[in-house]
Amino acid sequence: MDRVYNGMPAADLGAEGWHKPWSGGNGGNCVEAMKLADGRIAMRQSADPEGPALIYTHREIAAFIQGAKSGQADFLLT
């Protein structure tokens, strides 16, 4: 892979290595994540595997998960 960038086609990252960290009662459509060789994390919508991949640093994912666990993302559910 020459260049990994935010918004790149998720299919360009390959078909292997994507995981569904969670899945709700929505028929299996959810977020999929892939850990990249350089430690960053790519995320895509499972319903659109050819669509864009969002690329996050390990620190960004850790902050999101910690914030969600502490209730900081609860506003998204109201």
Image (spheres, grey):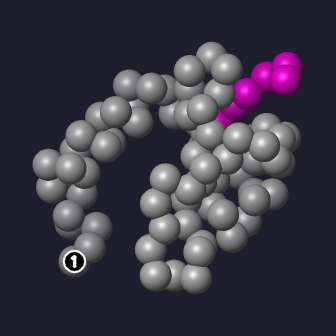
**Residue 76 forms part of the magenta stretch:** no
Q: Is residue 30 visible?
A: yes
Along the viewing direction, whichever of 63 and 20 lies nearer the viewer: 20
Q: Who's the residue at 25% across and 51% down the image?
A: 68
Along the viewing direction, whichever of 25 and 63 lies nearer the viewer: 25
The magenta region covers 1-6
**Residue 5 forms part of the magenta stretch:** yes
Give the residue at mark 1.
Answer: 78
Quarter of the view holding residue 60: top left
Along the viewing direction, whichever of 63 and 33 lies nearer the viewer: 33
Give percent across and percent down for residue 62: 34, 33
Q: Who's the residue at 69% across and 31% down the image?
A: 5
Q: Is residue 53 visible?
A: no
Quarter of the view holding residue 41: top right
Per the picture, the main secondary structure of the magenta-coloured stretch is loop
Q: Who's the residue at 67% across and 20% down the image?
A: 37
